[in-house]
Amino acid sequence: AQSVTQLDSQVPVFEEAPVELRCNYSSSVSVYLFWYVQYPNQGLQLLLKYLSGSTLVKGINGFEAEFNKSQTSFHLRKPSVHISDTAEYFCAVSSGAGGTSYGKLTFGQGTILTVHP
Amino acid sequence: DAMVIQNPRYQVTQFGKPVTLSCSQTLNHNVMYWYQQKSSQAPKLLFHYYDKDFNNEADTPDNFQSRRPNTSFCFLDIRSPGLGDAAMYLCATSFRPLPTDTQYFGPGTRLTVL
């Protein structure tokens, strides 16, 4: 079984400040990790994903995330946030198990990022 | 632009009255997924189609059914909606049913049950 824990339900920051959204996962098999963003009244949009290779992954809108296998973490970072980054962010994991687990995304509870002027 | 479209965006139904939500895609993807997202909760996979093969999650209630008449369309049928079924329903697609394939999401349908 796989699970995802997002450690902060809400993160308020000021514009141009750095931000880190934390994500920890558990899985008994090899994992693939994703960050999605959900703007109000919209669907989920992929920010970035880790499949293999370099543990530092760069995504859209200046976001990056680092895969840390020993700490089972995949934290999302941005060095300087904008008002337009205000949204809910979901960390998700899919695993290399067979059967119905293929393609199944397990999401964390989400982190609401609010950027204040 | 290739995309995933969901209709309607907002749906109101009465307790026990069947309702159908629609999803269409122009990505020509082989896999279509339905997720349920209740307020302040994570999206939860209900089922998915790989081509015409239907795959139900073990804990999806029998009240939820799905149809995929062709590659482009997929429907979510709720036979007798209860108050607990009020949620955002998200449709997603991917090219292959692999854990490495990105899933592309539609804007969702928000279902209200009165």
Image (cartoon, coloured by chain):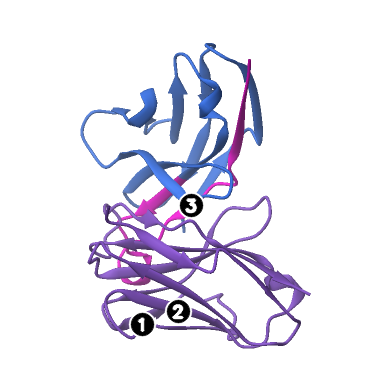
Q: Is A84 on the left-hand or right-hand side of B1? A: right
Mark 2–mark 1 CB contact (< 8 Å): yes
Q: Are marks 2 and 1 on the same chain?
A: yes
Up the image or down, A16 lies above or below B58; here it is: above
**Circle 2: is it few (<14), some (14-19), or many (20+) Cα within 10 Å?**
many
Task: Give the residue type at disc 3.
Answer: Gly
Provide the residue span drawn in magenta.
Answer: A92-117
| Chain designation of label 1 | B
Q: Tell me the residue that label 1 is attached to.
A: B68
Mark 3–mark 2 CB contact (< 8 Å): no
Q: Colour of chain B?
A: purple
Q: Is B109 on the left-hand or right-hand side of A11? A: left
Counting labels gives 3
Give the structural element (helix, strand or loop) at label 2: strand
Q: Is A73 on the left-hand or right-hand side of A15? A: left
Up the image or down, A33 lies above or below B49; here it is: above
**Residue A65 appears at what percent x and percent y?**
38, 28
Q: Tell me the residue that label 3 is attached to.
A: A43
| Chain designation of label 3 | A
Give the structural element (helix, strand or loop) at label 1: loop
**Residue A12 appears at what percent x and percent y?**
66, 23
At 66% from the left edge and 36% from the top edge, which residue is drawn? A9
Give the structural element (helix, strand or loop) at label 3: loop
The answer to whether residue A66 of the structure is visible from this angle is no
**Residue A68 appears at what percent x and percent y?**
38, 29
Q: Tell me the residue that label 2 is attached to.
A: B75
Q: Is residue B114 magenta?
A: no
Task: Give the residue type at disc 1.
Answer: Arg
